[in-house]
Amino acid sequence: MTELTDRYLFAATRSLPAAQREDLSRDLAERIADTIDARIESGASTPETAERDALVELGHPASLAATYSDRPLVLIGPRYFLIWKRLLLFLESFVPATVAAAAALGLVISGGGWEVIGAAIGIGINVAVQLAFWTTAVFAMIERFGTGTDAELGWTPEHLPQLPEVRRPHRRADLIASLVWLAIAAGFLVWQQFGVVWIDGERAAVPLLAPDLWSFWLPYVFALIALEAAFAVWIYRSDWNWANALVNVVLNAAFAIPAVWLFVEGRLVSAEFLAVIEPHLDADAEWVLSVIFVAGVVAACVWDSIDGIVKAARGGGRGTLDFPGNRSPRPAERSTGR
Amino acid sequence: MNPDETTTAHLQELRRGTVVLACLVRLRTPDYGYALLESLNGLGILVDANTLYPLLRRLEKQALLTSEWNTDEARPRKFYRTSPTGDALAIALMSDWRRIDDALGGLTTDQAGSTGPDTTGDAS
């Protein structure tokens, strides 16, 4: 046995607990010596090169040691891989974006300018990386020290996803909710004209929105509400698909862009209303309320747009996307029965 | 994966359990790692050193083999011997091996006897 073999034994056993080190070292020494002898005997190596060749044959000491020990060579094995993947995708799908948006809102409220966008992206990336790291670290620990069985993973047949044809059990509820909401919005636009401020229990004739908007923008909004209602019915009768999702984005933009623009220009809220609330608010509070209003309008419209896109991407209930596994029957097939 | 690799992988899988059985039977007479490797390969039970050495340790840990260091010769060697538990397992594995062999034999005989689904006319 020479220095090379000793170094190999040291490399192969150093990552093991001390108790196993001696034992494996002896086993390996026997194997290496026998391999060297066999190589010389068979003429595969000369006596000078036999040791080196034998060690090459054994391969990397760390992977050789791994074949002798029962420790896993994977970070997350097949038992936990799918749960890890599902949880990670679920968390990454909204946590970084939510934290970034919240941070951006906070920075704008505290007076940040355009640089807020860069800061928010940085925060979002940081959160995404941290999330991935800690989720993976926890699963790697479970892989090594956990003793979970399939039953403990909490899967039962009831967790199976619904078949596509019953994927839209809420579409009637969705329609009613949309129409009620639009009716309330339209009613509010009319009602606010006659005053939203009470002074000593008396309703003062102070409209919330600037009255000169009635010349164009308020009728525009009413038209938009009518279109939204028609669109909600259309979605109820057809389904989400890419075209409908695009229309949804356009409708949202048609509301959000003028609303934010009018607000920023100072044309949205009536002067009388501002005069009434001005004494109760300092400049900071006004700034905060303004930011929250703009962010709220943008967030609501962006959320609704994304919701439509997600539903379209999932293929709707009638399979506008023919992805494998979408076996929802077409209406004609459904009537013939199966 | 090309067809050759597929074949190799399936052959390895088929042989994996038989190596355990061969070790348990062969080590009723004590022997050390390299001699066992040589003799198994000589008998036509093809096994790789990287498979055999770790396997011996694993079987020892499962108390199917016992081991003893022989220091009589110039070089100390670990001699393995099948334990009574290992012997019982070897008998069980061997009877199952014969059963599978019979079953596969029956399967191939059946196939030779039948003429295939297209021509039997037995549409059940």
Image (tube, coloured by chain):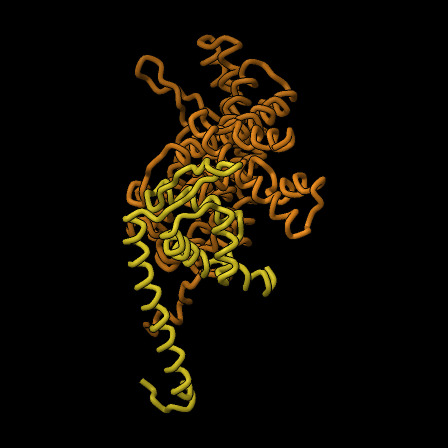
Near-viewer residue (A116 or A250):
A116
Near-viewer residue (A326 or A142):
A142
> A238 above or below B98?
above
Colour for chain B in the figure: yellow
Residue A300, image x, y percentages: 48, 34
Residue found 64% across the figure and 48% down from its top: A39
Residue A68, image x, y percentages: 47, 39
Choose top left, top right, bottom left or bottom right for residue A191.
top left
Residue A315, image x, y percentages: 48, 55
Near-viewer residue (B31 or A202):
B31
> A3 above or below B26?
above
> A320 above or below A199?
below
Quarter of the picture holding the C terminus of chain B: bottom left
Q: Is residue A204 left or right of residue A104?
A: left
Near-viewer residue (A72 or A211):
A72
Q: Which chain is orange?
A: A
Residue found 34% across the figure and 68% down from its top: B98
